[in-house]
Image (cartoon, rainbow, N blue to C red):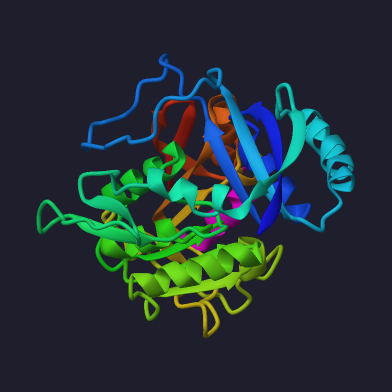
């Protein structure tokens, strides 16, 4: 079967936004290749193996490819995508050269060939990501395996932001915690949270392709009874503006260990309706999405968390670190830790 391959030469900063644009323009799949220059040190602290050779993409740049059916009018797609890529500059996102081209390829050239480079990856002390088509034997009884088949959704676990989130979850998850994963993608963080001791996870995404992929990966890991996947955003879940006002005077004390001897009950959102799999407020929220989106719902995350609750967020390019830090502080969060890998940043924040 023949497909049409649209290629955009851009920056690492803009890669996720442009990937979304290609999907919105009808792409049946998207691939992302970041810089592999010799100036970039690969993280091998957990014994990662890299089978894919370094490429010649300049540092800080990326190549994104979207795949369209043979019948699609590619001139029309280019005409739709080009101005939207350029528009990113108005939102402070630099798409770089933004060179766009396309060609016809055979399905075998892209649908399966990339799998040879996706190998089991140890991302933290306890977590290893394993594609379903690879054999792998855990090194110890403490090692937890996340089975993953990303399909057309984002989230193989190889991106630095995913690893940063999983390491933060490993550090802060307390056995029995309830978790919300905003922008779940392939569901990898939701599965990781369960393997680290969470009691239940609500995984949210606005992309129906991601929702389906997440449900499939939850099933692969036999966690259907503990992880609920829904096509939604956090604000809709909370019932819109003002949902935190509890007319009945509901008070919900923190269930997380606190350094405060007498933690006062604080009015927050009411318990969740049936079918969400968690009861609001929860102990942990994690979000691995674009910085420009993160800053739009920090207030909502604050409402969704119990006192002393933990918010872990990444997907933040280095030049947006200050923007996210200011949004977190403005919403009342205390920044507990900032971690970095390559050009990406993750925050761990606590609800005061």
Residue visible at 49% across and 53% down? 112
Is 66 above or below relative to 60?
below
Does residue 337 appear anywhere in the picture? yes
Q: Residue 108: where, in percent of width, then height?
A: 55, 53
Residue visible at 52% across and 60% down? 151
Residue visible at 70% across and 34% down? 8
- Which image quadrant is residue 111 in? bottom right
Task: Examine the residues drawn in magenta and state their main secondary structure.
Answer: helix
Q: Residue 266: where, in percent of width, then height?
A: 47, 62
Q: Is residue 134 left or right of residue 117?
A: left
Residue visible at 37% across and 63% down? 191
Q: Is residue 302 magenta?
A: yes
Quadrant into which the N terminus falls: bottom right
Mark count = 0
- Which image quadrant is residue 199 in? bottom left
Q: Is residue 78 left or right of residue 330?
A: right
Q: Is residue 36 left or right of residue 246?
A: left
Q: Nearer the viewer, residue 70 or 285?
A: 70
User: Which residues, given as a range, are shown in magenta?
Assistant: 295-305
Q: Is residue 68 left or right of residue 161?
A: right
């Amino acid at each position: 079967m023949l497909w049409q391959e649209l290629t955009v030469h851009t920056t690492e900063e803009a890669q996720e936004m442009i990937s979304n644009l290609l999907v919105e323009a009808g792409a049946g799949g998207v691939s992302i290749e970041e810089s592999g220059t010799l100036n970039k040190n690969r993280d091998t602290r957990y014994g990662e193996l890299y089978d894919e050779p370094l490429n010649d993409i300049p540092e800080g740049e990326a190549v994104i490819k979207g795949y369209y059916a043979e019948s699609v009018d590619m001139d029309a797609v280019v005409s739709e995508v080009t101005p939207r890529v350029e528009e990113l500059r108005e939102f402070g996102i630099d798409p770089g050269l933004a060179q766009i081209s396309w060609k016809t390829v055979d399905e075998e050239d892209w649908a399966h060939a990339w799998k040879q480079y996706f190998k089991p990856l140890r991302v933290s002390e306890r977590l290893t990501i394993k594609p379903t088509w690879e054999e792998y034997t855990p090194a110890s009884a403490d090692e937890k395996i996340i089975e993953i088949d990303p399909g057309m959704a984002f989230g193989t676990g190889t991106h630095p932001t995913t690893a940063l989130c999983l390491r933060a979850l490993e550090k802060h998850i307390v056995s029995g915690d309830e978790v919300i994963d905003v922008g779940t993608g392939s569901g990898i963080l939701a599965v990781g949270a369960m393997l680290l001791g969470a009691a239940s996870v609500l995984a949210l995404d606005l992309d129906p392709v991601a929702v389906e992929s997440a449900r499939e990966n939850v099933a692969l890991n036999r966690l259907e009874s503990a992880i609920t996947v829904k096509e939604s955003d956090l604000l809709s879940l909370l019932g819109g503006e003002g949902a935190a006002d509890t007319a009945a005077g509901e008070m919900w004390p923190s269930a997380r260990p606190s350094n405060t001897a007498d933690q006062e009950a604080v009015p927050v959102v009411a318990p969740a309706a049936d079918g969400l799999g968690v009861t609001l407020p929860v102990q942990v929220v994690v979000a691995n999405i674009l910085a420009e989106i993160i800053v739009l719902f920090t207030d909502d995350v604050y409402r969704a968390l119990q006192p002393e609750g933990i918010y872990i967020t990444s997907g933040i390019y280095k030049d947006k670190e200050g923007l996210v830090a200011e949004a977190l502080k403005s919403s009342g969060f205390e920044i507990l830790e900032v971690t970095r890998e390559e050009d990406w940043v993750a925050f761990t924040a606590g609800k005061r």
